[in-house]
Amino acid sequence: MDALLGPAGPWFREGALVSSVSLSTIRKQFGTTAVVHNVSLEVADGEVVALLGPSGSGKTTLLRLIAGFETADAGAIAIGGQDVTRRSALERRCGMVFQHYALFPHLTVGENVAYGLAHERLAAKSAAARVAEVLRLVDLAGYEARAVTALSGGQQQRVALARAIAPRPKVLLLDEPLSNLDPSLRERTRRELRDLVDAIGITTVLVTHEQEEAFDFADRIAVLHRGNLEQVGTPEVLYASPATPFVAGFVGRTSRLPAQAITPYSEGVIVRAAEIDWHATGDASLVGDCQLLLRPEGVRFAAVGSTGKVVRRRFAGAMAYFAVALPDGGEIEVAAVPDAAQVGETVHLEPTGIGAHAFAVDR
């Protein structure tokens, strides 16, 4: 598959109204179930933000609230500085790509794309030119007469994208658009999609439950959990400085250990866990019982130190992940070269000085 083409033609640059998105204390409830709790989020003009979280975290509901497919119970939504909280989906001018594409099987590729222009009231010639241009952008030039049912999954995804951007939306909303693609196609298509977003410069909000997809695609990531916005930041910030235990555990790999806060230091707090003192980021005022969330690169094998036994090994190319069982029943995951240890081997552990995060005990 060839790369998506760009940059966007004059039809987009001259007609698009790329806009910011602002959510202020948004709440949404279905029946007795609250699915979004007081979420506030700012997306700048032309920025790409991913809503990341597990199933049931409220990310798709939040996307549908932005689009106008759902109405917030409380709070305000602004697009381009204009309050759209009570405006219809059509008035908001958001382009949406659904998880299952929502293409019309009885229509051709060109007819599917033109469907997004139904409210533009373009002359037939102008509409045909717009359809041809967006199909060129998504590397489907000349596909107007093809049946969508004859296309591959990746091609159908691009038809859905072409339909979404044809009306020159203010904001592009993507609801897990790559989840139906084979793994071999997903990464390449993701990069092509980001290239297209950059080419047309459109503000974009992506919903995904896959950390790798969020890290690769977005400028910033909003991590959601049970309807709450846990943290917003770049991939680097979320990984190195998680604000909550959930973020630390969901973004990247971590081992969770019971710990005791010993003393504050310049960057956080020193805690004791697994008979080791760890220099951890966190609240310097922590006292007594706490929890340590430890990245695999935060610990290494050593000649002396805390003792454990390797119980599992997962090969990952140049690196392997070793699960080390501790005498107290806990377990630490260690990142090391593949031949660093063998399953069943007794090993010693020491901190590397990075990747340790301390939090109060979950209540």
Image: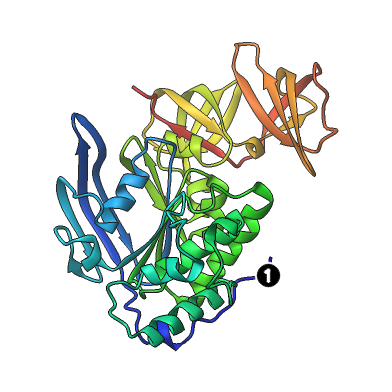
Compared to 70, does 322 lie above or below?
above
> Which secondary structure lies at badge 1?
loop
Compared to 81, does 355 lie above or below?
above
Residue 133 position in % (x across, y down): 49, 81
Can residue 13 be seen? no
Identify the residue shown where x is 48% and y is 85%. 9
Viewed as shown, does residue 128 lie left or right of 350?
Answer: left
Furthest residue in direction top, as rendered: 328
- Pointer 1 local density, CA inside 10 Å: few below 14, some 14–19, many at least 20: few
> Toward the viewer: 183 or 302?
183
Q: Which residue position is annotated with label 1?
A: 2
Compared to 23, does 252 lie above or below?
above
What colour scheme has been applied to the protein in the rendered image?
Answer: rainbow
Quarter of the figure that contains the N terminus: bottom right
Quarter of the figure that contains the C terminus: top left
Instruction: Report how many numbered discs are placed on residues in the image.
Output: 1
Identify the residue shown where x is 35% and y is 74%. 167
Identify the residue shown where x is 85% and y is 33%. 339
Viewed as shown, does residue 82 lie left or right of 353?
Answer: left
Can residue 88 be seen? yes
